Amino acid sequence: MAVRDGAPWVVEAVASVLGQTAGDLELIVIDDGSRDGTPALLDAVRDQRLRVEGRAPAGLTKALNRALALARAPLVARLDADDIALPERLARQRAFMDAHGEVGLLGSGAREVDGAGREIAVRIPPTDDAALRAALIRRNPFIHSAVMARRALVERAGGYDESVPVAQDYDLWMRLAPLTRLASLPEVLVVRRLLPDRVSVTRDDARLRAETRIRWRAVRRGGYPWWCAVFALRPAAALALPRPLRRGVRRALGR
């Protein structure tokens, strides 16, 4: 978990991990330069499984790589500091990974809510390897807060690319895909808060640029046939649209 100015959500996120039925875990939290009450809130948590490292602000991608460097378990899982892991999340994902040694990246469904806790949507990704690969070149089918992965494979893929400030998870999945099989559980195991700063105009532009680059690199590496380059052109075309028109197109498409 990486956090910057995470009050008031971070305590609930931390508690949701420490309260897992699969309690044999460590929770690594990188405080990326918080200026609010986050450090004091984390310091008040009395649980030896929690490891907190404070640092000067360096961005989410570097914070996630630092957390990976500190991790000791063979399986690693992600949770954003404003999301909630349901109690059985880690137990169900670990049981699946133990039973399917060929799978190195595992997702799950998520319930999306607004800041007041009102449900917006329920997202269930494809569950099998073929469907996830087919989706991956078109969009990011994995919910970052719902993934579990084998740490050795993440390290082999090079971790998160620190030149990618947003969509760093999508870039990592694309680099993991040639190394392992993919899967996702059809259950909702995470509650994901869609707060305003997650969908800001500035981040949207950066995300579209990143998606163009990520998909084009996947085609160039030979992971997809050349005709799939059309999927790299889609975010580039969206970026070229005036922002009001872009929002209108998304509303018309229902996303």
Image: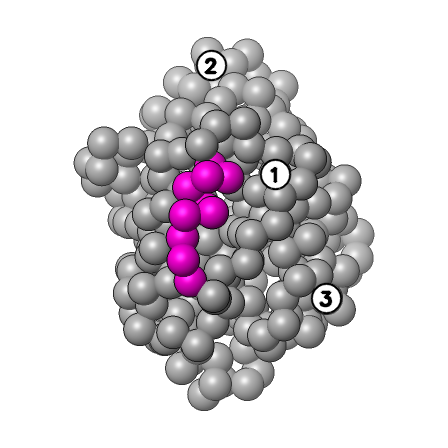
Q: Residue 101 carries which label?
A: none
Residue 96 locus on image (x, y percent): 42, 80
Q: Which quadrant: the C terminus?
A: top left
Residue highlighted by disc 1: 32
Mark 2 residue element:
helix
Indicate yes or no whether the magenta region holds residue 39: yes
In this rendering, the label closer to the viewer, 2 or 3: 3
Above or below, comparing residue 124 to residue 33 in the picture: below
Q: Earlier in the sequence, mark 2 or mark 1?
A: 1
Residue 57 locus on image (x, y percent): 66, 33
Mark 1 residue element:
strand
Residue highlighted by disc 3: 155
Residue highlighted by disc 2: 245
Residue drawn at 22 percent across, 37 percent down: 117
Q: How far apart are marks 1 and 3 (CA)?
A: 22 Å
Is residue 97 toward the left or the right of residue 57 in the image? left
Region rendered in magenta: 38-47
Of the pair 135 and 154, the residue shown nearer to us: 154
Of the pair 80 and 183, the residue shown nearer to us: 80
Residue 241 locus on image (x, y percent): 57, 17
Residue 29 locus on image (x, y percent): 54, 52
Of the pair 19 and 62, the residue shown nearer to us: 19
Of the pair 98 and 37, the residue shown nearer to us: 37
Q: Distance between the residues labelled 2 and 1?
A: 35 Å
Residue drawn at 42 percent across, 62 percent down: 47
Q: Which of marks 2 and 3 is nearer the N terminus?
A: 3
Mark 3 residue element:
helix
